[in-house]
Amino acid sequence: MPKESTMTEPIWNEIDDRLKAEIAARNPPKATVARARSIADILAQEFPEADCALDYTTPWELLMATILSAQCTDVRVNMVTPELRRKYKTLRDYAEAPEGELEKDIYSTGFYNNKAKAIRETARIILEKFSGEVPREMEGLLQLRGAARKTANVVRMHVFRLPGIAVDTHYGRITQRLGLTDETDPEKIEFDTAALLPPERWTQFADAVILHGRKTCAARSPKCEECALAQLCPSAGKVVTEPTAKKSKKG
């Protein structure tokens, strides 16, 4: 088994100061740490090729796709981005997209007015502050409109191959069910679970948890009877399955 990093090793130089401080402030029980690592081992076997579900070819395309993915499925975003790629050739094309035009192009992803504004402003900031290059540092990414820690982590994890945990609804739900955190705030969930695993395991773990949520641990009807994590999960068999809402007979 590979040696795990310590906080004095080079990989920690790639982690932002706030995350380092949050991890240092936590002292999770050894039993929880051991269980988290067993869960990570099982998920690594179940999803050995876990990766980002969004299609992209450049750092900007992944950043933009992640902005579009808010309250929208990755499948839908992947249907929209090829046309954007054909229509908008440069970062400046996005920054200078006419009012109403970009909104129309991303309409099907929902919340299109806010997303279009975020994309335009983010493109302008990258051009003006970062010489047209998407920053790799957390501090730089957080200066971009619409790039909270989740979006910043997605870019860092998958473009720059840096350690990170991107907390979406699947990740939050499953880590809560697994008893790895009792927080509901995405940032606090990130900090809690990062303290349980060495950073070289964060990305694979986060991506695998999300796939596990889509395949097995659904919000309404988790398949506990066929879950590989059932023996390690304090919620196994205890999640109340919500009934499917009946369709109204009214027209």
Image (cartoon, grey):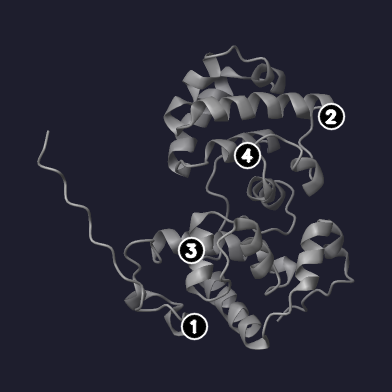
**Place of residue 110 in the rendered image (x, y in percent of width and height, measured from the top left):** 45, 32
What mark, if any, has residue 129 been given in the picture? 2
Residue 182 placement, left or right of 11: left
Mark 3 and mark 1 lie on one chain; the one further toward the N terminus is 3
What mark, if any, has residue 232 been given in the picture? 1
Q: Amino acid at mark 1?
A: Leu
Measure the C-alpha gap from mark 4 to mark 3. 24 Å
Q: Which residue is mark 4?
A: 62
Measure the C-alpha gap from mark 1 to mark 4. 34 Å
Measure the C-alpha gap from mark 1 to mark 2. 47 Å
* Circle 4 SS class: helix
Measure the C-alpha gap from mark 2 to mark 3. 36 Å
**Place of residue 229 in the rendered image (x, y in percent of width and height, measured from the top left):** 46, 78
Local crowd at mark 1 within 10 Å, few (<14), some, or many (≥20)?
some
Quadrant of res 90? top right
Tell me which residue sits at (43%, 37%) in the image: 76
Q: Which residue is mark 3?
A: 173
Q: Amino acid at mark 4?
A: Leu
